Image: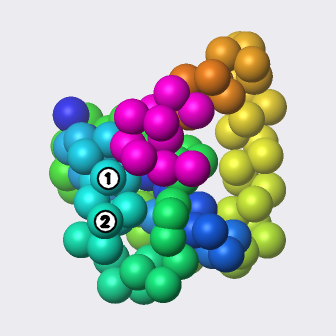
Amino acid sequence: MWFVYMVEGADGSLYTGITTDVARRVRQHNVGEGAKSLRGRLPVRLVHREEAATRAEAAKREREIKRLSRERKLAFLAAARESEQSPEMRSREMQEENNAQGGI
């Protein structure tokens, strides 16, 4: 199983990537082993993740998201939060995952 994920840096910047283990990848970002573009923007926190069946599907979705403007990414995140069954539950899941990853 592959995942597309989006993290937000301490400065509000957004980064999108793919991985098979979201928690591990966010931990790597937070210790400076992730993308170079995030190293001066630590810590990061997970703001979105979605599943993909294959690496190719994950990479395709990553490209789609990366092509969005910042404004459209923020709208996408807001819409994703709205579509969740229970916003409180989703928020709690993200907080738990961020805590497990050493995020803020």
> Looking at the image, do the residues carrying marks 1 and 2 touch, with CB atoms under 8 Å apart?
yes
Residue at the image position 79 percent from the left and 31 percent from the top: 82
Task: Report helix, strand or loop for mark 2.
Answer: loop
Relative placement, left or right, of 51 versus 99 is left
Q: Which residues are magenta?
A: 95-104
Provide the residue designation for mark 1: 27
Image quadrant where residue 31 sits: bottom left
Q: Few, some or many C-alpha atoms within 10 Å of disc 1 (few <14, some 14-19, many ≥20)?
A: many
Provide the residue designation for mark 2: 31
The vertical placement of 43 against 103, above or below, is: below
Tell me the colour scheme of the image.
Answer: rainbow
Image quadrant where residue 51 sits: top left
Residue at the image position 48 percent from the left and 84 percent from the top: 40
**Which three-letter amino acid code belongs to the residue tagged 1?**
Arg
Magenta stretch, main secondary structure, is: helix
**Residue 49 image position (x, y, % from top left):** 47, 42
The vertical placement of 61 against 81, above or below, is: below
Quadrant of the rendering where the N terminus is positioned: top left
